[in-house]
Image (tube, rainbow, N blue to C red):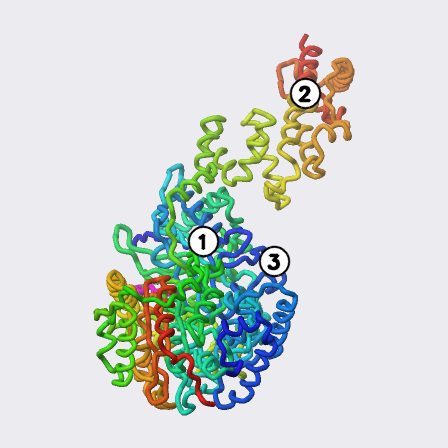
């Protein structure tokens, strides 16, 4: 087995046994990047020198017999909408193509405290707006399982990097499915933690009330390790919760006996591929076989998720993205006549089409005379959706669904029709609206393309999701398969 | 001729003098080099988040309590969206529909009558940066931006349209300033921009219920220009209506040079601010215990202090009002009173000679070179008869100029009063001998002549003679 396809916990064991060095691990990953990156294009920026330096430090620590944290020396990629001090951070947008943050995001700081080896910054849909990474202002990322297909989005670069062996783990962000959908498309584990579980400080905002940072990993154990590293209250983020973070490794228990799992019929009825349905049903039987009790249930307002999301998210985005005006940093259009002209030219030329579409949508729904009919109404329906989940969680420990209605689609298949593209997030969006955790774990393949199983839980029940996913993973081997590149 | 009634409401912006800004830990201090009191948060760099400065909320509660407002139990921040280069995020974090405080009032005095002016609301927000132009905004080849002020905490205090004249508006603003200065949360310097004021002005036919169309007046940078601008605007509106015209709802700016208001923005051009709840901050639940603990910090306010001066010190209402108009003045008065317990004497000196010298030297009372204790020492040596009342004024001027205490100056300048009867008798006899005409005038009942004779003694002693003693000696020598 190649070093670059091992998991973080496997690598950690080997490091402690001194069978390998962190430098070797990182060399293996950067060699892998060199050989496959041309066909995957997961990264916008590589930070090899930085990674090798950290790897050497970790080797020195181990050599000196000092204890090292579980992720020490592990090559980890960071989505390029998360600020890294001194390393260009673009959100895949031309409008801040040259922005070098003078500060680290809180998650980056926390990971640095673990001595991770940051491999680089990964590609995404511009400002995380998209479901295929085709909206990147620079280039598209390819799905390692089929390079004619998209890796999903918006964290497509992070998902593809982990799947292709270009990093061992990765950090992404999820506003409406941007971790879970690409995790499903690329056959890796991804979790969107509870809103408030992970600090958003340093995450370039798309929709503040929905954005949440989370990890991509090759298995559930690594997912627990990553959550251990990044969860927790941050005084710099008022929306981060002051809750006590458990040790998620303790949740890695192979047991789902008596676990009550609800399957909302709204997720299994509409527009779902027959092949995907079959795989999900097989996964359900497997869990039942292990002692879980599975029942159908209903989330009556789920059908409103998509319209509610496309009112709230663009509204917040229209305001969050107002700061990109050419005055202080980033791209500034040349030859403007006055300040208003500078704003208009800079923003017209600097933003891509999808970003502009959402800014216009959001500006419209917040406008005088429309606010009540659109934005306020959307907030009210969001509350109804939350209540649906609350009601379901009175009866069930976990809700289960496919992560996406179909596997990865081909390039250009949905770019002509924004609504069609938006529909690819139809199963993931409600989780963000409700603020609850959602995890995607590989559960099979359709025509060689991975399929993801989505598990959803009460706020701060990540541990329970990990336990169910871990049990599922123990009796399957999807996570051991790797794409041929 | 139609009679009109003036209707004015004021919107006041107040810079709080907290150590750090409202949503980050950058310094709020004034006058640093451009863009030195900034951090990623107040510069609005990508990915940063605001965190509320608790001291700002506490100060807002303190001011709201001083203005008799109801403190909200649930309050939140909102985003006010508009593009301007001095705003790092192109939105301002402010408060929209759930401000920290509502429904207050303050009392102003008009011709001896008290009038309650309603306060609609009080809310917190962040200040913007400043544009620096080369010359004027229309001709400058480029503009620079200084973000030191961006994120400095502001309170906005909106009055009801209860003000019925430009003078009332000015008195309201002066009272508001006085109350806020008492709370100690702001310098309230209009000239430096830590107190800013916009006005909504309309007129209506006397007796009518409904309001006329209003205009909003901006750019009034002193109390004087507030009253001048409003006076101009009211007469402009009456003139337009008198000519059968209609008032256009618009924003106008006060042009101090020309002494007129000019339109800058019509209603149609007004921004649509697209307010929505700030998703980066959680709503605030204001615990009642907290409010009560802030209330304990509330100092004695000007109205209460004035009443106390009238009640306990027996001062006239007017004098008490002047002394309590600023906290510094009242504190000075009381410090002086601690060392010398005659309220009337202290009050007369502060309102008289002290204020005169402060004004002519353009000083505030807290910059006064004469300390309250030194002023009290002057009263003491005056009472002891060491110096005369006339000399006391000379000594006071010297104290003001040098900062020295009264005793030192009297000694240095040899200003001790001559109360030695023997030496004064000699001078009195000399004067009697030299002015037989006045002496006989006085003897025949012309009292005025005595004044002249006393004056001669004063002249000879350079004002140091004890006037009572001199009077007594003349009466003895001439009348007996």
N-terminal label among 2 and 3: 3
In the image, what residue occupies the spot 43% across and 56% down?
Answer: A244
Specify the quadrant of the image occupied by residue A185.
Answer: bottom left
N-terminal label among 1 and 2: 1
Let me know if residue B246 is in the magenta part: yes
Nearer the camera: disc 1 or disc 2: 1
Q: Residues within 10 Å of mark 1 (few under 14, many from 20)?
A: many
According to the picture, the residue beneath numbered tag 1 turns out to be B155
Element carrying mark 1 = strand
- The residues colored magenta run B244-252
Where does the image place residue A400, in percent across and percent down from the top left? 29, 72
Where does the image place residue B302, in percent across and percent down from the top left? 46, 38
Viewer-nearest residue: A310 or B264: A310
N-terminal label among 1 and 3: 3
Q: Is residue A246 left or right of residue B148?
A: left
Nearer the camera: disc 2 or disc 3: 3
Q: Are marks 1 and 2 on the same chain?
A: yes
Label 3 chain ID: B
Q: Is residue B416 left or right of residue A253?
A: right
Q: Is residue A430 above or below residue B288?
A: below
Dominant SS of magenta comes to loop
Element carrying mark 2 = loop
Let me know if residue B330 is in the magenta part: no
According to the picture, the residue beneath numbered tag 3 turns out to be B31
Viewer-nearest residue: B149 or B209: B149
Q: Residues within 10 Å of mark 2 (few under 14, many from 20)?
A: some
According to the picture, the residue beneath numbered tag 2 turns out to be B385
Q: Which mark is residue A31?
A: none
Where does the image place residue B87, in percent across and percent down from the top left? 49, 67
């Amino acid at each position: 087995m190649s070093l670059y396809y091992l998991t973080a916990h496997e690598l950690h064991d080997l490091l402690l046994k001194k069978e390998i060095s962190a430098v070797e691990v990182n060399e293996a990953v950067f060699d892998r990047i060199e050989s496959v990156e041309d066909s995957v294009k997961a990264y916008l920026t590589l930070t090899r020198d930085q990674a090798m330096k950290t790897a050497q430090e970790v080797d020195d620590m181990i050599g000196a017999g000092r204890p090292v944290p579980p992720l020490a020396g592990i090559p980890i990629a960071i989505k390029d909408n998360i600020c890294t001090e001194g390393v260009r951070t673009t959100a895949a947008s031309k409008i801040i193509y040259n922005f070098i943050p003078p500060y680290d995001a809180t998650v980056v700081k926390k990971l640095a405290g673990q001595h991770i080896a940051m491999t680089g910054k990964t590609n995404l849909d511009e400002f995380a707006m998209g479901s295929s990474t085709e909206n990147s202002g620079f280039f598209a990322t390819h799905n390692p399982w089929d390079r004619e297909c998209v890796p999903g989005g918006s964290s497509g670069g992070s998902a593809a990097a982990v799947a292709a062996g270009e990093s061992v783990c990765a950090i992404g962000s999820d506003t409406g499915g941007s971790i879970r959908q690409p995790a499903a498309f690329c056959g890796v584990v991804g979790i969107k933690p509870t809103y408030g579980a992970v600090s958003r400080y340093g995450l370039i905002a798309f929709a503040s009330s929905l954005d949440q940072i989370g990890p991509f990993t090759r298995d559930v154990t690594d997912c627990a390790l990553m959550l251990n590293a990044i969860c927790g209250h941050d005084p710099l983020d008022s929306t981060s919760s002051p809750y006590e973070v458990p040790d998620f490794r303790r949740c890695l228990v192979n047991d789902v006996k008596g676990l009550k799992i609800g399957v909302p019929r709204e997720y299994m009825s509409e527009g779902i591929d027959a092949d995907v349905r079959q795989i999900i049903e097989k996964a359900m039987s497997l869990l039942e076989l292990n002692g879980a009790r599975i029942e159908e249930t209903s989330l009556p307002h789920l059908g409103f998720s998509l319209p509610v999301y496309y009112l709230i998210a663009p509204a917040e985005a229209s305001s969050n993205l107002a700061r990109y005006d050419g005055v202080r940093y980033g791209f500034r259009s040349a030859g403007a006549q006055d300040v208003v002209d500078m704003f208009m030219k800079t923003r017209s030329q600097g933003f891509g089409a999808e970003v502009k579409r959402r800014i216009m949508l959001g500006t419209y729904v917040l406008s005088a005379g429309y606010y009540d009919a659109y934005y306020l109404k959307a907030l009210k329906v969001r509350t109804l959706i939350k209540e649906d989940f609350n009601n379901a969680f009175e009866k069930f420990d976990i809700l289960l669904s496919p992560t996406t209605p179909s596997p990865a689609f081909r390039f250009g298949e949905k770019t002509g029709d924004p609504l069609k593209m938006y529909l690819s997030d139809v199963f993931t969006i409600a989780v963000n609206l409700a603020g609850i955790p959602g995890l995607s774990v590989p559960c099979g393949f359709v025509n060689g393309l991975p399929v993801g199983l989505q598990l959803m839980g009460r706020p701060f029940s990540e541990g329970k999701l990990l336990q169910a996913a871990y049990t599922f993973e123990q009796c399957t081997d999807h996570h051991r398969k790797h794409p041929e590149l | 001729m139609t009679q009109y009634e003036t209707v004015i409401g004021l919107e006041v912006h107040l810079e709080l003098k907290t150590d750090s800004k409202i949503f980050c830990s950058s310094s709020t201090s004034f006058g640093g080099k451009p863009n030195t009191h900034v951090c990623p948060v107040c510069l609005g760099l990508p990915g940063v988040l605001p965190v509320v400065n608790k001291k700002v909320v506490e100060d807002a509660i303190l001011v709201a309590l001083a203005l008799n407002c109801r403190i909200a139990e649930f309050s939140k921040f909102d985003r006010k969206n508009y593009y301007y280069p001095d705003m790092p995020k192109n939105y301002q974090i402010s408060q929209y529909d759930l401000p920290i405080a509502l429904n207050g009032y303050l009392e102003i005095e008009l011709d001896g009558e008290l009038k309650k002016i309603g306060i609609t609301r009080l809310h917190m927000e962040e200040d913007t940066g400043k544009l620096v132009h080369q010359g004027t905004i229309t001709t400058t080849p480029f503009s620079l931006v200084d973000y030191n002020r961006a994120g400095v905490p502001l309170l906005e205090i909106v009055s009801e349209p209860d003000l019925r004249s430009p003078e009332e508006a000015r008195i309201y603003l002066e009272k508001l300033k006085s109350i806020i200065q008492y709370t100690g949360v702001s310098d309230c310097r209009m000239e430096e921009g830590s107190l800013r004021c916009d006005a909504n002005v309309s007129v209506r036919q006397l007796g009518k219920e409904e309001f006329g169309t209003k205009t909003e007046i901006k750019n009034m940078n002193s109390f004087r220009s507030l009253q001048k601008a409003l006076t101009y605007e009211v007469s402009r509106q009456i003139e337009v209506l008198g000519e059968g015209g209609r008032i256009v709802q618009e924003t106008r700016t006060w042009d101090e040079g020309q002494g007129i208001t000019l339109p800058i923005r019509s209603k149609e051009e007004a921004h649509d601010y697209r307010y929505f709840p700030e998703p980066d901050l959680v709503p605030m639940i204001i615990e009642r215990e907290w409010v009560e603990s802030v209330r304990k910090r509330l100092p004695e306010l000007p109205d209460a202090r004035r009443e106390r001066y009238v009640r306990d010190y027996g001062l006239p209402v007017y004098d008490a009002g002047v002394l309590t108009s600023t906290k510094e003045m009242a504190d000075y008065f009381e410090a002086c009173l601690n060392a010398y317990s005659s309220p009337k004497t202290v009050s007369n000196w502060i309102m008289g000679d002290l204020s005169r010298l402060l004004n002519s030297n353009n000083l505030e009372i807290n910059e006064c070179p004469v300390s309250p204790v030194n002023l009290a020492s002057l009263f003491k040596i005056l009472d002891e008869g060491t110096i005369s009342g006339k000399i006391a004024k000379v000594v006071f001027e010297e104290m003001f100029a040098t900062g020295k205490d009264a005793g030192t100056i009297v000694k240095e300048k040899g200003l001790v009063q001559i109360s030695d009867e023997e030496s004064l008798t000699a001078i009195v006899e000399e004067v009697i001998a030299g002015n037989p005409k006045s002496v006989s005038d006085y003897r025949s009942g012309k009292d005025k002549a005595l004044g002249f004779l006393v004056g001669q003694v004063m002249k000879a002693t350079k004002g140091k003679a004890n006037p009572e003693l001199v009077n007594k000696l003349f009466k003895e020598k001439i009348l007996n």
